[in-house]
Image: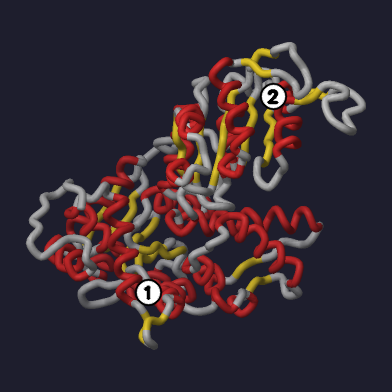
């Protein structure tokens, strides 16, 4: 099959090369130019299957280029890349016919996923993905999500304990189930137990089980979660909230690989794999004396951190569409669409409740919808304003400093603090990046760090 050509219109040479390398690694071929006018001339000679353009270009803008393309070649999908915070321009581009918009710094996984989806919808044969890992029900194509899938694939075969960290609502139990399903224990049970806000006696009896007469009300013997799960996986959610006395018993179980039922004397072998999860910082809990240090190290053999949704915005669209379809199916409703402006506003929102918040909001929007389409006006008030307007005011002035700092730190994190690569992602020169880093207090006026050094 001949290689599918993608036209990249980007005036920053280094960023153009990075985008081309990403797409060519996925099996596409690329045509590159720095100006919209030249892009139109190229398209008159040889039609690409898709156009990826920056919004800010010398001369004609990305949105103007989009309008010209749609007038002459309406079947060609166009993706627009916008700078952080330019949500209004992104919405205008969507209304003008853009297939999707991407926020700089562009997420590799999101870019490839959107291109594949756009081509598939237009009947193109889709090339096999460079990395096609099992999903285990995990939705999203951001680089952060792909890294989680890679970790599951790598860690699942080992018997080692895993500690999953991340904010509430990020999908820690789903990742734990993924680890179980990808392991040799997949045919054995997976049981989840929430350790938070439960009295000590109940936690102990639920996990270890109890013998008849072990306490008032114990009229018969009962197996605990460890016994029921057998050689499967026990998921201890919110392990940071486990009472200290129970932490001692769990530590002894992990050390000796055996346990006894409450009120019993016969030791039972521990065959299960333990996966724990918490939204609190256990290292700080250890310092504060709320969590045993020795148990922390026993559980934290393999750490797995799930980034919050605001750090993997490339997943938002996929999650919204997934929950829309699922909720409509569960409620027996006709399919509900979502307008571009509403989707753009949801992509700009910070989602403090993470995936759980998206799920709950989508269900509410579907239940209350009467038109078959979710509009921007249907969203909660906090989502109907721009990211810049949402920044908390300081003394009556909006804190744009905080917004710029978030964008710069995000780019540095994605490139492992390589300043040259971070500058490319932000669409600025390395000198401009260093000036902004100094202004933001990320480096001092006298520091002279080299690329790759950490700040």
Q: Position of residue 262 (x, y in %)?
A: 76, 24
Q: Is residue 217 left or right of residue 143?
A: right
Q: Nearer the viewer, residue 70 or 270?
A: 270
Residue 400: x and y, percent? 33, 77
Residue at the image position 47 percent from the left and 68 percent from the top: 348
Residue lying at 52% horizontally and 58% vertically, measured from the top left = 316
Disc tally is 2
Say if 179 sits above or below 141 in the image.
Answer: above
Q: Position of residue 446 (x, y in %)?
A: 7, 61
Foreground of the two, 451 or 206: 206
Q: Circle 2 — which element?
A: helix
Q: Report helix, strand or loop for mark 1.
A: loop
Q: Position of residue 413 (x, y in %)?
A: 30, 52
Mark 1 sits on what residue? 86
Q: Is residue 317 above or below residue 133?
A: below
Q: Specify whether residue 215 is in view.
A: yes
Q: Give the residue number, with chain letter if any, for mark 2.
A: 226
The residue drawn where x is 53% and y is 48% is: 279
Quarter of the figure with the N terminus: top left
| Pointer 2 or 1: first along the chain | 1
For residue 271, side relative to residue 99 (left or right):
right
Question: Which is more toward the observer, 284 or 163?
Answer: 284
């Amino acid at each position: 099959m001949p290689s599918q050509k993608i036209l990249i219109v980007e005036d920053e040479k280094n960023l153009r090369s990075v985008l081309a390398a990403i797409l060519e690694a996925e099996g596409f071929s690329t045509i590159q130019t720095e100006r919209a006018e030249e892009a139109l001339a190229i398209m008159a000679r040889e039609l690409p299957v898709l156009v990826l353009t920056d919004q800010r270009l010398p001369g004609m803008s990305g949105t103007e280029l989009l309008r010209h393309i749609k007038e002459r070649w309406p079947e060609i999908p166009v993706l627009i890349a916008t700078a952080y915070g330019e949500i209004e321009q992104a919405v205008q581009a969507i209304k003008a016919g853009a297939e999707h918009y991407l926020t700089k710094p562009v997420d590799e996984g999101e870019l490839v996923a959107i291109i594949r989806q756009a081509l598939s919808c237009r009947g193109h044969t889709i090339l096999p993905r460079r990395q096609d890992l099992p999903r285990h029900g995990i939705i999203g194509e951001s680089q952060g999500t792909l890294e989680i899938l890679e970790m599951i694939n790598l860690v699942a075969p080992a018997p080692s304990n895993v500690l999953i960290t991340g904010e509430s609502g990020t999908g820690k139990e789903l990742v734990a189930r993924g680890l179980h399903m990808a392991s040799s224990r997949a045919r054995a049970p997976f049981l989840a137990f929430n350790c938070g806000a439960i009295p000590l006696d109940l936690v102990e009896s639920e996990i270890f089980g109890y013998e008849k007469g072990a306490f008032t009300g114990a009229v018969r013997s009962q197996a605990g979660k460890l016994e029921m799960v057998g050689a499967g996986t026990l998921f201890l959610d919110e392990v940071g909230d486990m009472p200290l006395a129970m932490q001692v018993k769990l530590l002894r179980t992990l050390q000796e690989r055996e346990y006894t039922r409450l009120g019993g004397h016969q030791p039972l072998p521990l065959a299960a794999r333990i996966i724990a999860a918490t939204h609190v910082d256990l290292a700080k809990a250890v310092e504060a004396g709320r969590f045993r240090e020795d148990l922390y190290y026993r559980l934290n053999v393999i750490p797995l951190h799930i980034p919050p949704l605001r750090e993997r915005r490339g997943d938002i669209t996929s999650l919204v569409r997934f929950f829309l379809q699922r909720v409509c199916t569960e409620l027996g409703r006709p399919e509900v669409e979502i307008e571009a402006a509403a989707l753009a506003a949801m992509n700009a929102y910070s989602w403090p409740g993470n995936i759980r918040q998206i799920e709950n909001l989508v269900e509410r929007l579907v239940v209350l919808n009467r038109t078959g389409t979710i509009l921007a006006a249907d969203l909660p008030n906090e989502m109907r304003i721009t990211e810049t307007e949402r920044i908390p005011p300081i003394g009556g002035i909006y804190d744009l400093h905080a917004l710029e700092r978030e964008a710069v730190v995000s780019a540095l994190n994605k490139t492992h603090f390589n300043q040259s690569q971070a500058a490319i992602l932000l669409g600025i020169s390395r000198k401009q990046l260093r000036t902004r880093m100094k202004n933001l207090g990320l480096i001092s006026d006298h520091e002279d760090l080299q690329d790759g050094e950490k700040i």
